[in-house]
Image (cartoon, rainbow, N blue to C red):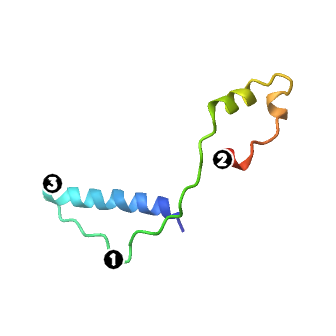
Amino acid sequence: MRAPATWNRDRAAVTSWLTWCHPKKHWAAPIVPAEAERRKESADETRAVAKATIHRRLSRRDIPLRERPEPPKSWR
């Protein structure tokens, strides 16, 4: 099963293409079935990391890049 955002994006692309087919090319095109309804997406609480924080972490020369700890979950 796909993530809700992926499902909704793909569904919108297919719906848009099917809607375009009939008036522009006069192709017979089916409609998207009612069972393929949009899925509820959870709120995205991702926050941007300050440039100063990124610069500070990337400019540390005392720790080799491969030895630096994994970024906190807030960076993902």
Task: Give the spatial CA distance, label 2 vs label 1.
Answer: 35 Å
What secondary structure is marked by label 1? loop
Q: Residue at x 28, y 57 (%)?
A: 16
Tell me where residue 4 appears, x and y as whole percent.
50, 64
Ranked by sequence position, the earlier of labels 3 and 1 is 3
Q: What residue is disc 3 on?
A: 25
Q: Residues within 10 Å of mark 3 (few under 14, many from 20)?
A: few
- Residue 76, compared with residue 3, is above or below; it is above
Which of the two marks, 3 or 1, is nearer to us in this view?
1
Residues at circles 2 and 3 in contact by the CB criterion of under 8 Å: no
Q: What residue is disc 2 on?
A: 76
What secondary structure is marked by label 2? loop
Say the numbered circle drawn on residue 74: none
Ranked by sequence position, the earlier of labels 2 and 3 is 3
Q: What residue is disc 1 on?
A: 34
Side of 67 relative to 6 (left or right):
right
